[in-house]
């Protein structure tokens, strides 16, 4: 780098640039959080959904699955599992059966643990997954398989 | 032979040693998971995949933190030209952090996660069960306490000593690390907000403040091994971190495409994150330039190799593999596939694992009283470790990328109804996962060679 470009100038770009873009980031974050209610349908977060999220966390489901593409890549995407497995008509029946059947014990197949949840808890998790599936995430994933 | 400029730098040693112990654990659990990917029931229900994954990623983060702390305790006094404010505090914090870390990992392994959440009172202040932030709330509080003590100790040292650019950048990076970690305590019941602010920890760490830490460590080692003028090195350092933050802060947007956010993030995230490879590329130019312009032949060739290697691998892992999937139209198809895993591996290894091994390579001979550098034989073994680990990681990345491309092809590109299901796709990827596991074994061999190099001494003349 040429001699005319000094360390002091580089330092000023660093401080000025980072502060400037950090402020823009904060402004956009502020705007985004104002827009979010239109897309996350928070009015539908029931007590049951809240308990479902806690169960999702307390059992570390994210350690195998993705949820809207974030998490682990070992097991299927679950943000749209509600739509994939029956929706309004069939999801709860499917889900309850699924949770109770674990581990499937098919030799060589990836195993999902048995979490010993009661019917209420399974229903809460189902409500959480239903609410999650109904959020507007800019049309991700590309297809039903997630 | 004691070559330490300041005796209190010695507190760095336990941090580095413990980091390496955790590193071994990280890799063993990585290999276990690699097997579970292809033989799902390999250990029955003994260690479920999610447990192994928490252990793997949390050990990684914690050993990198130990490495950063060791690096700071080593370089801050030398830069400030004064002894560390309180070596006793540094050692006390070492034991607290190590004990908390071991207890947390044992907690993951010995009791079901839900039980751990219950006994640590997660319902009082829920922070657990989110990727990378799985630690019980009490552990998170412990991390904050350790960080505060650590920053206080360094801050007092810098206040009474010389305030070099390297020290200021290192300190800013470390403070930023602590500040952004505070978002780990924010876990709203609304998943949309939870996810948005989760990235304030994860992205603003690895593509923000950690780059300052990496830049400062690299600058320090380059000054030492090349003898190039400090003014030049520090000017580059500012340019690099300026580019890193200017691109990386708004680059956070590349994680907001598919959250419940306005669509402008697809533009902001794509444009700014597309610039993120630049600082990594600048680091390559800078490292090679400085080494070419070197004014001295430092006897520690291995440290120079690590310094060059980390710049190249960080550029490949973060810059090239990051760019690969960062534009919104591409990310729509690749989001959350094995491509993400490929990038995560090479970026974490190239930038952060390797920068820690760079400073260790430079500092350990001095910390152990060996002298300026290890003997030739030890350096040769260390370089074997470097190459085996690095080549192992290149192949892990390539095989995961292969798996990811096929996954996108089979599962993401076709229409609903024609796309293969997730599990059916995984079966088709088995060959890539087996090859990844073999590359992982090469990586482990490299790690063994690297650790063995610490015990190699000059052959006694016959
Ligand atoms: C023997 C070598 C290794 C093997 C076999 C291995 C295997 C794995 C596996 C199977 C996962 C979980 C992927 C999933 O969620 O489905 C994972 C995650 C991860 N590993 Fe490794 N690993 C190895 C070494 C490393 C190293 C050296 C690093 C970094 C220095 C690393 C960093 C990570 C990170 C950051 C994640 C989370 C990735 C993400 O969320 O995208 N691993 N690893
Ligand atoms: C050393 C720096 C970096 C590290 C350690 C790193 C690490 C990671 C990790 C671990 C993830 C997975 C997070 C998760 O589990 O969901 C990730 C995701 C991602 N990274 Fe990086 N990264 C770095 C730099 C970059 C850069 C410079 C770019 C862009 C040029 C980039 C682009 C991305 C993108 C687009 C994703 C999201 C992938 C997805 O949609 O699934 N990264 N990174
Ligand atoms: Fe990112």
Image (spheres, grey):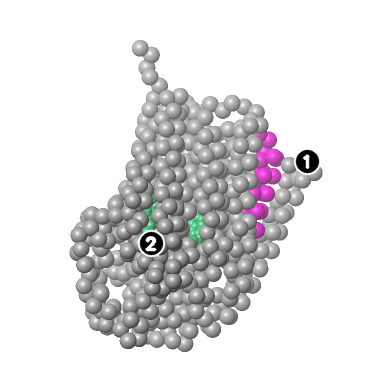
- Of badges 2 and 1, the one in the foreground is 2
Image coordinates of residue B280 in percent, x first then y, are: 59, 48
Tag on residue A3? 1
Image coordinates of residue A119 in percent, x first then y, are: 24, 82
Find the residue positioned furthest to the right.
Answer: A4
Q: Nearer the viewer, residue B383 or B6?
A: B383
Q: Nearer the viewer, residue B271 or B1?
A: B271
Question: Of label 2 and label 1, which has the lower sequence position?
Answer: 1
Quadrant holding the C terminus of chain B: top left
Q: CA distance from mark 2 to mark 1?
A: 50 Å
Q: Nearer the viewer, residue B139 or B57?
A: B57
Q: Is residue B433 above or below residue A41?
A: above
Numbered disc 1: secondary structure: loop
Numbered disc 2: secondary structure: loop
Image coordinates of residue A94 in percent, x first then y, are: 27, 79
Image coordinates of residue B3 in percent, x first then y, are: 51, 30
Tag on residue A73? 2
């Amino acid at each position: 780098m040429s001699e005319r470009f000094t360390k002091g100038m580089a330092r000023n770009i660093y401080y000025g640039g980072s502060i400037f873009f950090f402020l823009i980031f904060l402004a956009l974050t502020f705007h985004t959080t104002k827009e979010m209610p239109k897309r996350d349908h928070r009015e539908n977060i029931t007590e049951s959904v809240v308990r479902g999220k806690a169960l999702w966390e307390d059992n570390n489901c994210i350690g195998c699955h993705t949820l809207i593409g974030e998490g682990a890549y070992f097991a299927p995407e679950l943000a749209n599992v509600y739509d994939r497995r029956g929706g309004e008509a069939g999801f709860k029946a499917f889900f309850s059966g699924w949770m109770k059947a674990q581990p499937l014990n098919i030799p060589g197949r990836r195993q999902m643990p048995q979490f010993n949840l009661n019917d209420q808890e399974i229903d809460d998790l189902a409500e959480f997954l239903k609410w999650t599936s109904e959020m507007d995430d800019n049309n991700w994933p590309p297809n039903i398989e997630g | 032979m004691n070559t330490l400029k300041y005796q209190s730098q010695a507190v760095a040693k336990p941090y580095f040693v413990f980091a390496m112990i955790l590193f071994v654990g990280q890799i063993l659990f990585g290999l276990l998971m690699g097997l579970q990917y292809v033989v799902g029931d390999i250990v029955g229900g003994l260690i479920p995949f999610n447990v192994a994954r928490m252990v793997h990623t949390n050990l990684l983060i914690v050993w990198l933190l130990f490495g950063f702390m060791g690096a700071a305790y080593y370089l801050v006094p030398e830069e400030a030209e004064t002894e560390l404010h309180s070596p006793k505090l540094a050692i006390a914090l070492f034991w607290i952090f190590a004990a908390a870390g071991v207890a947390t990992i044992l907690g993951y392994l010995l009791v079901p996660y839900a039980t751990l959440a219950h006994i640590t009172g997660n319902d009082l202040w829920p922070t657990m069960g989110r990727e990378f932030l799985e630690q019980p709330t009490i552990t998170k509080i412990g991390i904050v306490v350790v960080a505060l003590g650590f920053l206080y100790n360094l801050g007092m040292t810098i206040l009474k000593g010389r305030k070099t650019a390297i020290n200021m950048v290192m300190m800013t990076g470390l403070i930023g690390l602590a500040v952004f970690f505070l978002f780990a305590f924010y876990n709203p019941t609304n998943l949309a907000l939870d996810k948005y602010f989760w990235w304030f920890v994860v992205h603003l760490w690895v593509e923000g403040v950690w780059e300052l830490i990496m830049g400062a460590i690299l600058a320090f080692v380059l000054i030492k091994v090349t003898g190039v003028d400090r003014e030049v090195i520090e000017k580059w350092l500012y340019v690099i971190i300026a580019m890193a933050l200017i691109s990386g802060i708004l680059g956070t947007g590349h994680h907001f495409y598919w959250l419940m956010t306005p669509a402008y993030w697809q533009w902001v995230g794509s444009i700014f994150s597309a610039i993120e490879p630049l600082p990594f590329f600048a680091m390559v130019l800078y490292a090679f330039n400085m080494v070419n312009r070197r004014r001295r032949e430092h006897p520690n060739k291995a440290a120079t190799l690590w310094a060059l290697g980390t710049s190249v691998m960080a550029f490949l892992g973060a810059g090239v593999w990051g760019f690969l999937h960062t534009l919104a139209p591409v990310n729509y198809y690749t989001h959350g596939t094995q491509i993400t895993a490929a990038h995560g591996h090479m970026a974490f290894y190239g930038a952060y694992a390797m920068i820690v091994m760079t400073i260790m390579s430079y500092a350990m001979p001095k910390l152990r009283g060996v002298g300026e550098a290890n003997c030739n034989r030890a350096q040769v073994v260390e370089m074997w470790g470097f190459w085996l680990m690095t080549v192992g990681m290149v192949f892990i990345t390539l095989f995961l990328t292969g798996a990811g491309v096929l996954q996108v092809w089979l599962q993401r590109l076709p229409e609903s109804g024609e796309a293969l299901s997730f599990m059916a796709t995984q079966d088709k990827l088995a060959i890539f996962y087996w090859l990844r596991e073999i590359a992982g074994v090469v990586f482990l061999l490299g790690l063994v060679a690297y650790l063995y190099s610490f015990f190699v001494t000059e052959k006694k003349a016959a």
